[in-house]
Image (cartoon, coloured by chain):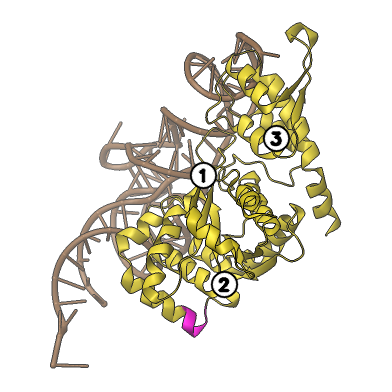
Chain colours: A yellow, B brown
Amino acid sequence: MDIDSTTNIIKKGTLEVVTPEELNKKLVKNQKTAYIGYEPSGKVHLGHAITVKKMIDLEKAGFKVKILLADLHAYLNGKGSLEEIKEISDYNAKCFRALGLSEDAKFILGSSFQTQEDYTMKVYQLALLTTLTRAKRSMAQITRDAEDHQVAEVIYPLMQVVDMLFLDVDLAVGGMEQRKIHMLARDNLPKLGFPAPVCIHTPLLHGTDGSDKMSSSKENFIAIDDEPNVIKKKIKKSYCPAGEIEGNPILEIAHHFIFSERDRLVIERPDKFGGNLDLTQEELLKMYENGDLHPLDLKNSVADCLVDILEPVRNYLKESH
RNA sequence: CCCGCCUUAGCUCAAUUGGCAGAGCGUCGGACUGUAGAUCCGAAUGUUGCUGGUUCAAGUCCGGCAGGCGGGACCA
């Protein structure tokens, strides 16, 4: 595959690559590693899936993929006891495989290396380089809502920076909420004498309630292994203003999960409302914006299609028990 | 270690001299729209931080403990 088409695969659907020039330099390397970290979560949802799909793209682009199951980070973010978190990290690894990551992708449990002496020493060095304000700011969209802030909150981003060093990554991937931590890494790793990774950021999926971010801690997500009737129910309940194509969670789901794999979407609707349609994404957006496609017809079609697309994921997870 | 203040529904907070523990927001349900939301109705929700005591009766008074906030002390 030539550099241009590889670059296109990598950039597709991302909000930014920091920086494209550095990415090009990485692409000519023989051995190159891309990484993303996840706090283990009881539910892996469509927001996670967007980034997993990007990791699959990176495998195709010749990167070795490392997935950090960030159990210690989750612990520092108040998600529960380390034991509980470790348990669900196994489940999460299965979910990521179910979404199509190859057997070559490596899963690494954070606590397996994050307490080593030289790791800890690096965290201390970073602690001295980083202002409290910046560390806190980097956590703005990540910290669990809390009135009383723990010191853990500022250890978290420092560890994430050191992770990139220890996992020897050329490229770090994350949703846009990871941006400030990534920038911290890019500023400070060179100060410790190490190269900074290229960073790639994917868009955040709006919650089904229309809020800024799909999140497992707010009941506004669709899990990748939700049963068909659950998916349908959640989509029916979703925020979906007529004619509004910006920040519309249903159209976003269609974009990221349906039109990423299919060219057209069949919309079944009663004759009295105009009859069935067979649309490209472009046509669908135009009709919707013009008010020629009713939200309920959109929802029904997107729900059916999403149920279909996630079927292999559900089957994989059922069989792996 | 010492002193003071705080802790009531998922969240923010009310509750008179000790007298049936409430509101707003959120959640859920119904109406209205061929979706959701908005709007209008309606409903549910509590070990009043934990613990011991006083009292016919304690969210309220007294003691102990825990957590939080603020201050003080210690600083060879």
Residue name at image x 57 percent, y 72 percent: A167
Query: What residue is disc 3 on?
Result: A259
Compared with residue A213, is residue B68 higher up or lower down, i.e. above or below? below
Q: Position of residue B9 (x, y in %)?
A: 49, 43
Q: Residue A313: image x %, image y %?
A: 78, 49
Give the foreground label among 2 and 1. 1
- Which SS class for mark 2? loop
Q: Mark on residue A15?
A: 1
Chain part drawn in magenta: A115-119
Residue A95 spot, x, y in % from top left: 72, 55
Q: Kindly report the distance in space between the C-alpha atoms of the residues bearing marks 3 and 1.
A: 18 Å
Give the residue type that dot 2 points to.
Leu
Tell me which residue sits at (53%, 31%) in the image. Answer: A247
The numbered dot on residue A2 is none
Which residue in the structure is indicated by mark 2? A167
Choose between B68 and A37: the one closer to the eye.
A37
